[in-house]
Amino acid sequence: MDVETLTDAYRAGWTASVRCLGRDASTKKGTRACGQSVNLDLPSMIWTRGRDYPLAMLPERLKCPSCGCRRVFIVFSMPGKGSQAMMGG
């Protein structure tokens, strides 16, 4: 089964987390990595993005609430396989 959309990932039992790759602008010259990290709620993502939203487009649509950076790294965990699918922007 190919998992290409948010609904596919949700039905397959995947979980997702995202980490910011930006810099913390509150530090002098933004020298410290932001590193904000959260778990994504796939049902909420389906409600807001739509059932057929492509997983490949997620990194370009997310924005860190802490520093405002759009450079993020998403990790999808697949149940029972101990493996992960990663994508970044």
Image: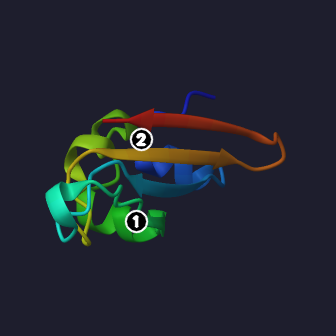
**Label 2's element?**
loop
- Three-letter amino acid code of the residue under disc 2: Thr
Q: Which residue corresponds to mark 2?
A: 5
Q: Which residue corresponds to mark 1?
A: 36
Image x and y of residue 10, in percent: 55, 55
**Quadrant location of the N terminus?**
top right
Is the residue 36 above or below the residue 74 in the image? Answer: below
Question: Which callout, 2 or 1, points at the residue further toward the start of the chain?
Answer: 2
Using residue 87 as the reference point, say whether residue 63 is left or right of it.
Answer: left
Is the residue 43 above or below the residue 82 in the image? Answer: below
Residue 53 in view = no
Residue 63, picture quadrant:
bottom left
Q: Residue at x 54, y 46 (%)?
A: 75
Q: Residue at x 35, y 33 (%)?
A: 56
* Label 2 Cα crowd, 10 Å radius (few <14 / some 14-19 / many 20+): some
Q: Residue at x 81, y 42 (%)?
A: 82
Whole-number angstrom distance, CA of label 2 to CA of label 1: 25 Å
**28 or 73, nearer to the observer:** 28
Residue 82 in view = yes
Q: Residue at x 45, y 46 (%)?
A: 74
**Residue at the far top in the pictured view:** 2
- Disc 2 or disc 1, which is closer to the eye? 1
**Residue at the far front in the pictured view:** 28
Image x and y of residue 89, in percent: 30, 36
**6 or 23, nearer to the observer:** 23
Image x and y of residue 35, in percent: 41, 59
Using residue 82 as the reference point, say whether residue 22 is left or right of it.
Answer: left
